[in-house]
Image (spheres, helix red, strand yellow):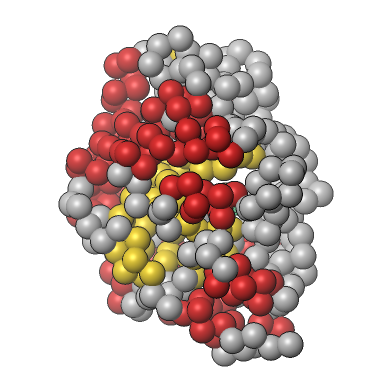
Amino acid sequence: MTIDPATLFEPLRIGGMTVPNRIALAPMTREFAPDGVPGDDVVEYYRRRAAGGTGLIITEGMAVNATGAHDGPIPLLFQPETQLALARIATAVTGEGACIVPQLWHVGLQDSPTTVNPDTVKQRPPRVGPSGIYGNGKPGGSPMTDAQIADTIADFARCAAGAMSAGCDGIEIHGAHGYLPDQFMWSRTNRRKDRYGGDVAQRSRFLAEIVAACRAATSPDFAIIARISQWKSVDYDARLADSADDWAAMLAPLCDAGVDAFHCSTRRFWEPAFPDGGPTLAALTRRLSGRPVIAVGSVTLERDFKQGTSETGGGIAESAARSAHVAQIVEAMEAGEFDMIAVGRAMIANADWANIVREGRADNLRPFAREMLATLA
Ligand SMILES: Cc1cc2nc3c(=O)[nH]c(=O)nc-3n(C[C@H](O)[C@H](O)[C@H](O)COP(=O)(O)O)c2cc1C
């Protein structure tokens, strides 16, 4: 049965940003930014995806400060020269009619001492996190002081203001996958006894304060998206919340702080949020928050992005294409389960994923192969 994909091509309002359609490029770290500055090749990589019909470009994670920078040549957004590079990316993307939000990233105590490169460790400031506990439950790094928390929140806000000056339509705050804001939200890594620790609502205070600071540093129409997840790179079965009520308690401070949309990161977009077989995390979040929601995970692919790879965070799974997902996505969107779909690996393999789908040619989508990560094609 062929399905009319027209629903995917209706505009969507997120805060003050109007995205021309319901398709986003998922944020993907590409490590092609020598000295933290994306060059012409990165500008072209994003422009091609915008020209391929994508409505919203969510960039790879960009570090908000040196303490929170992932090892490797990722964009260091706190540098003025990186903000100039972001302006060039934004000009290229918006010139093709798409919207753009950079992803703001702080890794916190994500890297465990066994997985980091000792050479780069020597060159960067010591890692910090809520309680000096890694995602694997082992001690390490240092617990953040109140002053460090305040400075980090200010760094997010400064980068948000920088993104606005660079001509972006908004930002996405990386609050997922076990990175710093998620470390605050997760009971395994947050053992604080102060106002940043405690029950689920108190544990989301740190992310809520980041949202509020970014809101205050930007204009009211500048879109603020929060990416959140249950799963962590160090533990795919981890949960921030064990029930819909807990999830609601966690979302409430974020909504009060001014989040315009949620990006619910799951590895398979169709799976129920809880083992009881109820709604997906995206559908649940949309219902509880009343905000637009972006869903993600294995879109038009047979395998999820960690399937068959090591539990300690290594490796990205390759996958055959699966066109039948298009009908599933359209149906879920029409049923009000989510408002936008983010496409990751399938959009590395197909820069014109959106145009291919709009033309009803999803059977022609290319599979995703790991070698594709070696270039910015
Ligand atoms: C190479 C690669 C890099 C990624 N980097 C990021 C990142 O910087 N920030 C983030 O939130 N997610 C990151 N992810 C996760 C993706 O945004 C997405 O959630 C995941 O790939 C699942 O979508 P897919 O099955 O369509 O690929 C990355 C994924 C891949 C494949």
Q: Is residue 56 visible?
A: yes
Question: For the C terminus, which image quadrant?
Answer: bottom right
Horizontally, residue 317 falls left or right of residue 254, namely: right
Q: Which residue is drawn at the image coordinates 55% and 35% (left, top)?
A: 245
Q: Determine the image quadrant of residue 170.
A: bottom left
- For residue 312, side relative to residue 223 (left or right): right
User: At which x and y percent is residue 218?
Assistant: 20, 48
What residue is rendered at 43% in x and 58% in y? Answer: 292
Q: Which one is in front, 296 or 279?
A: 279
Q: In the image, what residue occupies the spot 50% across and 58% down?
A: 294
Q: Say above or below: 222 vs 153.
A: below
Looking at the image, residue 293 sits to the left or right of residue 300; the answer is left
Q: Is residue 62 visible?
A: no
In the rendered image, the vertical position of residue 325 relative to residue 275, given as above or below: below
Note whether 167 is above or below 179 in the view shown. Answer: below
Does 282 sit above or below residue 310? below
In the rendered image, the quadrant that contains the N terminus is: bottom right
Query: How many dots with numbers?
Result: 0
List x then y, in percent, for residue 6.
51, 84
* Residue lying at the far top of the rendered structure: 193
Q: Residue at x 50, y 38 (%)?
A: 248
The percent position of residue 187, horizontal first and vertical second, equals 57, 22
Q: Which residue lies most toward the right here? A: 308
**What percent of the width, then of the height, locates residue 274?**
69, 43
155 vs 187, nearest the viewer: 187
